[in-house]
Amino acid sequence: QVQLVESGGGLVQPGGSLRLSCAASGSIFSINTMAWYRQAPGKQRELVAVISSGGSTHYADSVKGRFTISRANANMMYLEMNSLKPEDTAVYYCNAIAGSSRYNYWGQGTQVTVSS
């Protein structure tokens, strides 16, 4: 079992920055890939960025060059978000794939609102 808790969301003006954190607990050494997803009102949840256990990263085209995903130790993941736009407004979710069964774990989400 893996538990995920996000933090760092909030209200920011267009062009501003935020840093999201995801703290993992439980069977953290079984975690393989971690990722950030987001879901805007009335839209499907979408992948924002993913990072493998080896540090390889992949970003959605909409956030390339503005967002940076990183991991630290065995239990922390971050999303540095710069040059935020109103269309980045969404609930951001932490995701971890763990174990030989590659089970998906999710956090409860943190709200990011970009508005003037």
Image: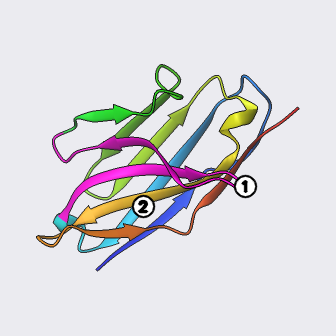
Residue denoted by label 1 = 41
User: Is residue 21 or residue 49 the one in the foreground?
Assistant: 49
Q: Nearer the viewer, mark 1 or mark 2?
A: 1
Residue denoted by label 2 = 23
Residue 39 sits inside the magenta stretch? yes
Q: Can you say which quadrant of the picture contains the C terminus? A: top right
- Residue 67 located left or right of residue 33: right
Q: Amino acid at mark 2?
A: Ala
Residues in magenta, as a range: 31-54
User: Is residue 3 or residue 90 the one in the foreground?
Assistant: 90
Relative to residue 22, is residue 50 depicted above or below?
Answer: above
User: Is residue 27 or residue 89 the one in the foreground?
Assistant: 89
Q: Amino acid at mark 1?
A: Pro
- Residue 43 located left or right of residue 70: right
The structure residue drawn at horizontal position 27% and vertical position 62%, both measured from the top left corner, is 97
Question: In which image quadrant can residue 78 be found?
Answer: top left
> Percent from the top left, x then y, of residue 83?
64, 22
- Residue 16 located left or right of residue 32: right
The structure residue drawn at horizontal position 70% and vertical position 35%, both measured from the top left corner, is 87
